[in-house]
Amino acid sequence: MSDEKLGKVAGNGLISRRHLLKVGASGAGLALSAGALGADQGLSFQIPTWSRQPGPGATAYGARSPFADDLQRLAAQPNPTYPGGGSSRSPLQHLQGTITPNSLHFERHHAGVPNIDPSQHMLVINGLVRQPLAFRYEDLLKYQMVSRIHFLECSGNSGALLRGEIGGSAQSLHGLVSCAEWTGIPLSTLLDEAGVLPEAAWVAAVGADAASMGRSIPLTKALDDVMVALYQNGEAVRPGQGYPMRLFCPGWEGNVSVKWLTQIKVTQEPAQFRDETSKYTDTLQNRSSYQFTFPMGTKSLITSPSGEMTLNQPGIYQITGIAWSGRGSIRQVEVSADGGKTWAEAAIQGHQLDRALTRFTIPWEWNGGDAILQSRATDSRGSIQPTRSDVIASRGTLSFYHNPCIQSWQVGPAGEVRNVYV
Ligand SMILES: Nc1nc2c(c(=O)[nH]1)N[C@H]1C(S)=C(S)[C@@H](COP(=O)(O)O)O[C@H]1N2
Ligand SMILES: [Mo]
């Protein structure tokens, strides 16, 4: 049969999404649960134990199935010289759709999670304003809010690939990205009330954690789409995400979305905080550094099959993954099964929202031979995800923040999937 007849759309087994996969088992010999509809067409049914009696009733706060309890964040080992510092990563290889459940949203803390009583917490706006203001939590609840679905990505995400680390999973290599519906008050509303003076050009945002983590944000961004977020996926922002309030800067490196937000100082110049000088800058080969690299790049990642998974046998697999861009929406994702020699366009599974995760999918037939799976995103501005060599050629090997490069997953002869560099 011709490749077209088989539905092949690119080299090494990528299949058209319109092709019938025929992977469902035929009924013969299978014991299935019939529900209320009864057996049919030679399928024999058994009633499972859970259908024979009522289960427990409704609960005050939901929990997931014990069969799904292995979905856990991956936390870095505690470091006694850096109390509370570190991160935990989202289990990207087990998630579907585009919204990260709050309990699995990645975390990055510089001095642990403060236990903030919202009735004792204040947000102060001062500096180059006509009238300094202080807001209590209840005050903020009186303002009109907006809801936006956006990804959040740590600028250190995927840095392991530039360091050339061996092995790793989607979670361990790329799990510092998540996506949620954020609800809060546009920062412009609060700045307008304080009355920004004409000479102002930046704001300095500071958190109430023991790190007093601060970042400078250009006033243009602060007045454009930055919000003081109080809710995440409909419930109060979790302590790990900044309860009772955090700054949220759509599309920009996670570090500027200051958690446990307690002060916004309007200034003429950036404050030069520790986290914008000693860290989160990108040093080039000539030892000069990029500072204030704010928007995250155009990026995608195959989440399944991915590193540390095993394909049990040759056959059909649904490749799926996520794509995002800090400057717009995702226009297209292409997938390769031969290490980038040939590409096929993946189907977009749902939303293609501005600066949000976008899910892609494409069926693939693994023939048991060598395969290298890659995905490549293009955003709404036409920017194409670079290869690792592109990134290294453009800025050398001294920096590992802000890495959007294409991930390569090699499928070995026993079906083992691992991170490789091509
Ligand atoms: N006050 C404060 N804000 C902070 C941090 C912090 O340690 N303290 N970490 C920053 C970093 S580096 C990132 S990537 C994001 C992570 O947000 P998340 O933990 O909600 O995923 O928060 C940022 N805001
Ligand atoms: Mo970060």
Image: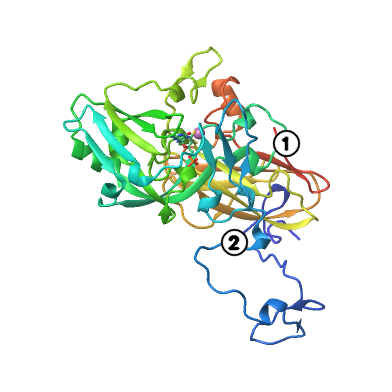
Residue 257 drawn above or below residue 72: above
- Residue 167's label in the rendered image is 1
Q: Amino acid at mark 2?
A: Arg
Residue 365 drawn above or below residue 116: below
Q: Is residue 161 visible?
A: yes
Residue 369 drawn above or below residue 131: below
- Mark 1 neighbour density, 10 Å: few (under 14) some (14–19) many (20 or more): some
Residue at the image position 29 percent from the left and 40 percent from the top = 187
Left or right relative to 10: residue 258 = left
Which quarter of the figure is the N terminus placed in? bottom right
Residue 208 is drawn in which quadrant?
top left
Q: Residue furthest top?
A: 286
Q: Position of residue 100 (x, y in %)?
A: 52, 51
Nearer-the-camera pick, 210 or 149: 210
- Residue 247's label in the rendered image is none
Q: Position of residue 299 (x, y in %)?
A: 53, 40
Q: Amino acid at mark 1?
A: Gly
Q: Does any atom of ligand 1 lie closer than 8 Å to the CB of label 2?
A: no
Left or right relative to 280: residue 416 = right
Q: Is residue 100 visible?
A: no
Q: Does any atom of ligand 2 lie closer than 8 Å to the CB of label 1?
A: no
- Residue 64's label in the rendered image is 2
Q: Position of residue 61 (x, y in %)?
A: 51, 63
For marks 2 and 1, give the CA distance: 30 Å
Q: Residue furthest left?
A: 130
Q: Secondary structure at mark 2?
A: loop
Residue 411 is drawn in which quadrant?
top right
Task: Decide which of tag 2 and tag 1 comes sooner along the chain.
Answer: 2
- Mark 2 neighbour density, 10 Å: few (under 14) some (14–19) many (20 or more): few
Between tags 2 and 1, which lies in front?
Answer: 2
